[in-house]
Image: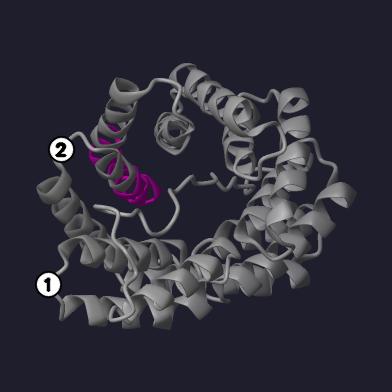
């Protein structure tokens, strides 16, 4: 199945970092907006959250509280990132990081969170030389403060993803396992956040053709992701990657319904033109081509090419 592609899951820290522990005073009209944005973000409803996050930032730009401005910048950046608008997200993350470093110092926990977010943004753009030092610095800050802090898990997983993307699986696997262990110890084996790390670890096994190790991890990843809601983007990622295992083993009947569901979930969570859809579209098209269903494959490939071209036109 040569055309089959994997979707590396991403681990991004939560919205509203709390720079300087800002309080939502009644006069701060952006506070209630931020709370709504966070709730929508956690539900995977990024498009619904976007106008509220923009409104929050507009309010904070007019104020003098730099800590709250940093929160609004990070929140909007996280939404733009999850919607595939990387060129828009990058300067927002950079501004938020600069504010955090100025207010809190270079070794603060909130700085570590922002370094993780920016590093992951670079990873998805395959800017590995930019991503690696950001993520290493994020991990180093957490380790210095508390080596057992589960908040280190996203940066560990994202750094592992950098190495996995570079086929440096010997470096990636222990980072994923450590990330997994930190979250399991702190929050138990059924925490939904584990879905991302399980999916990432399975990716290293799939690329090494260790399918017997990858399949149970992805089934567990899917089960945990579904706790976030049936239309969360993490569900689609887990579905696509589980289908990938089946495609590599030519288990087409098992893979097809998973890919169809992955596409439907991606569309609901991220919109019909998000770059995240491309690999799932290509995977389903590849399945149809393998089965000689060229008429079914053609429109999927055409749609994937159109999404990719649109993203390239936006310099994403």
What's the CA distance linking mark 2 and mark 1?
Answer: 22 Å
The N terminus - image quarter: top right
Label disc, if present, on residue 141 of the rendered structure: none
Residue found 75% across the figure and 54% down from its top: 287
Give whichever of 241, 81 is nearer the camera.
81
- Residue 33 vertical position relative to residue 97 in the rendered view, above or below: below
Residue found 45% across the figure and 30% down from its top: 160
Question: Tag 2's secondary structure?
Answer: loop
Q: Is residue 129 magenta?
A: yes
Disc 2 marks which residue?
Answer: 106
What is the span of residues highlighted in magenta in the rendered image?
Answer: 115-132
Among the 4 quarters of the image, the one containing residue 126: top left
Disc 1 marks which residue?
Answer: 64
Q: Which callout, 2 or 1, points at the residue further toward the start of the chain? A: 1
Residue found 28% across the figure and 25% down from its top: 140
Which percent across, then down, holds residue 53?
37, 75
Residue found 89% across the figure and 51% down from its top: 253
The C terminus - image quarter: bottom left
Locate residue 20 relative to residue 98 in the image: left or right.
Answer: right
Which percent across, then down, holds residue 176?
53, 27
Locate residue 243 relative to residue 14 in the image: left or right.
Answer: right
Question: Tag 1's secondary structure?
Answer: loop
- Residue 126 vertical position relative to residue 64 in the rendered view, above or below: above
Which percent across, then down, holds residue 258?
79, 55
Q: Is residue 198 magenta?
A: no
Locate residue 90 relative to residue 105 in the image: left or right.
Answer: right
Residue count near mark 2 (Cα–Cα under 10 Å), binned few <14, some 14–19, many ≥20 = some
- Residue 121 vertical position relative to residue 173 in the rendered view, above or below: below
């Amino acid at each position: 199945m040569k055309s089959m592609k994997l979707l590396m899951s991403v681990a991004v820290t939560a919205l509203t970092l709390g720079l300087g522990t800002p309080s939502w005073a009644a006069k701060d009209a952006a506070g209630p907006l931020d709370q709504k944005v966070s709730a929508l973000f956690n539900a995977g409803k990024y498009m619904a959250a976007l106008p509220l996050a923009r409104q929050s930032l507009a309010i904070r730009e007019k104020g003098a509280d730099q800590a709250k401005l940093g929160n609004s910048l990070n929140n909007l950046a996280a939404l733009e990132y999850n919607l595939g608008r990387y060129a828009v997200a990058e300067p927002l993350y950079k501004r938020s990081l600069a504010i955090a470093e100025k207010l809190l110092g270079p070794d603060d926990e909130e700085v570590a969170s922002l370094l993780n977010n920016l590093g992951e943004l670079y990873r998805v753009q395959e800017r590995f030389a930019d991503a690696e030092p950001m993520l290493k610095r994020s991990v180093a800050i957490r380790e210095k403060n508390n080596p057992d802090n589960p908040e280190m898990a996203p940066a560990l997983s994202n750094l592992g993803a950098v190495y996995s993307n570079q086929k440096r699986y010997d470096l990636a696997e222990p980072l994923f396992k450590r990330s997994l262990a930190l979250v399991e110890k702190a929050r138990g084996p059924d925490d939904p956040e584990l879905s991302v790390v399980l999916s990432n670890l399975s990716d290293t096994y799939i690329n090494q053709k260790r399918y017997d190790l990858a399949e149970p991890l992805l089934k567990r990843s899917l089960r945990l992701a579904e706790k976030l809601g049936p239309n969360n983007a993490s569900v689609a990622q887990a579905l696509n990657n589980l289908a990938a295992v089946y495609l590599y083993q030519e288990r087409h009947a098992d893979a097809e319904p998973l890919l169809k569901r992955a596409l439907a979930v991606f569309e609901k969570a991220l919109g019909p033109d998000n770059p995240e859809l491309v690999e799932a579209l290509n995977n389903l098209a590849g399945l149809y081509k393998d089965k000689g269903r060229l008429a079914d494959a053609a429109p999927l490939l055409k749609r994937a090419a159109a999404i990719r071209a649109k993203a390239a036109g936006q310099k994403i």
